[in-house]
Amino acid sequence: MAAVSAAAARLHHLLSLCVAVAGLLLMLLGGGEASVHEYRGLGFLNKGNAFILHAGSEGLYAPSSPANATTAEDDEDAAAAAVADAFIRFDKITFRRPKDAAKETGSAMVQILVFEIEDREMIGGSAYGGQKAICCTSDLAKLGACTEGSVIYRPSQVNPGWPQLLFASFDGSDTIATLPSRIIPITKTGMYNMYFIHCDPSLAGLEIEGQTVWKNPTGYLPGRMAPLKNFFGIMSFAFVVLGIYWFYQYMKFWREVLPLQNCITLVITLGMLEMSLWYFEYAEFNETGVRPKGITFWAVTFGTVKRTVARVIILIVSMGYGVVRPSLGGLTSKVVMLGGTFFLATEILELVENLGAVNDLSGKARLFLVYPVAILDAAFVVWIFISLAKTLDKLQARRSMAKLDIYRKFTIALAVTVLVSIGWIGYEIYFKSTDVFNERWQYAWIIPAFWHVLSFSLLCVISYLWAPSQNSMRFTYDASENFDREDSLSLIRPGPIASKNGWSLSSSPDTKATKNVTVTSFDGDDEENKRE
């Protein structure tokens, strides 16, 4: 127990350090993904003959009532009605150009393009089959297809009135151009994209301030995230049901509780807190349109702690701690180090994904964060199954049938979980690789939800196998089980036979040599046990 206490203390200090690092990362992160998109300190990228800034991309549901299905731009009643349903609203969008550019260029304009992803082919064009351009070229202008210097687009045949193009103009030598506040009602469910575009190279260094607000009929949650609010509510209820069952068993047989069962209690408690925090985080996000960073941070942290503790518990159970061995010996520090590293890598990844500007991360940057977590997770899986194989062999050799039965069920549950995980990872890769433009955004919530359901299912199996009961103590470590069959025979080996004349038959050299023979135990060559 002293070794376990020391390991717990080391893990506590390591986790505290990791939380401090994660907190520092939280302060360094900018505004997170939100339905209120703020624009400050962003620059335009040169793509072809256009300068483009991606201003947002969200799945939006059309209102269920057709009463607000209007495209009137200046109708105040329509705008007010849209506020209660689905819309995109522009708030104080201001563009600022350098004074030198204003003197040299004179009048100029910035264009705001909003379109549904199905209309992406309506954007851009080319003259005489050449390279596709976003801004109208002189050749296209001669053909009468567009006005030179403006964004090229064709009206959608499926969605009348779309794409929508708005303008913010610099008059004369003005350095500031403002987009009048307005609302675009959403009348069709889809993935909507917004880009700020200008076609004038003299506007290099253009700065932007302001925000846009994207709203669904049910609130400000992005469409692909909206179902997760109800999902986390259901998962919170599921953890409460599991907790009631577990704590009832715990209180009923509290005299028989094992250290392992205390660890399972911790995991269930962390799971309750994680699901509850995620539900309140999504509820707050849905009300305000901005992620509550404090709640998000603690939801991520509790979830990461839960996953780390769960993996460490499964690993030490697989090693047979408390069942076939009294301590971990020299492996304690390695287990703590692997757990702490996994926590830090997972915490950083989850914070960046939930609080960072995810759309700004390139593929390589995301892989830089994902790879360490995947490698550490794989290390846990390999170490767990290697340890399980050794533990099963020991239980089989010692004929501990009750322990062997529960470990076999535990192994089957883990194997099924790993196989399902591998299959789901393959599906996730297929889903994301074949949905480049997020056209299946309405089903994207299933990807993260599945992992929560899978981990909860495994926790239910473990809770069932190791539930507190009046027979809990039969699964604890028993020192007498260290004696295998040969050891037992050596204990009842007959001593030297004395003859009638008093001479001992053990006085021969062979007998003396026999006395020096030691019986090797089953685990004598186990380096892990030598260190205990």
Image (cartoon, helix red, strand yellow):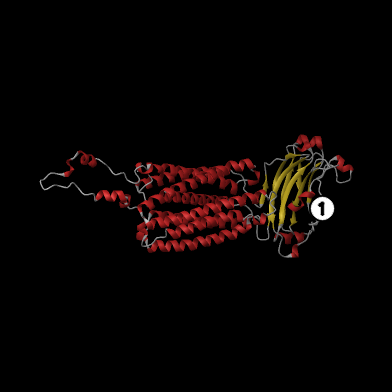
Q: Quadrant of the C terminus?
A: top left
Q: Badge 1: how crowded within 10 Å, few (<14), some, or many (20+)? A: some
Q: Position of residue 362 (x, y in %)?
A: 65, 42
Dividing the picture into quadrants, the one containing residue 218 is: bottom right
Q: Is residue 307 left or right of residue 473?
A: right
Comparing 310 with 488, the one in front is: 488
Closer to the camera in the image, 252 or 280: 252
Q: Is residue 43 left or right of residue 486?
A: right
* Residue wearing tag 1: 155
Q: Position of residue 448 (x, y in %)?
A: 59, 53
Horizontal arrangement in the rendering, residue 119 relative to residue 364 (left or right): right
Q: Amino acid at mark 1?
A: Pro
Q: Residue at x 40, y 50 (%)?
A: 393
Query: Which SS class for mark 1?
Result: loop
Taking the image as drawn, is residue 19 in sight?
no
Outermost front residue: 500
What x and y, as percent, mark residue 208? Answer: 71, 43
Residue at point 37%, 59% (across, down): 472
Viewer-side residue, 333 vs 271 = 333
Q: Is residue 398 something one can see in this rendering?
A: yes
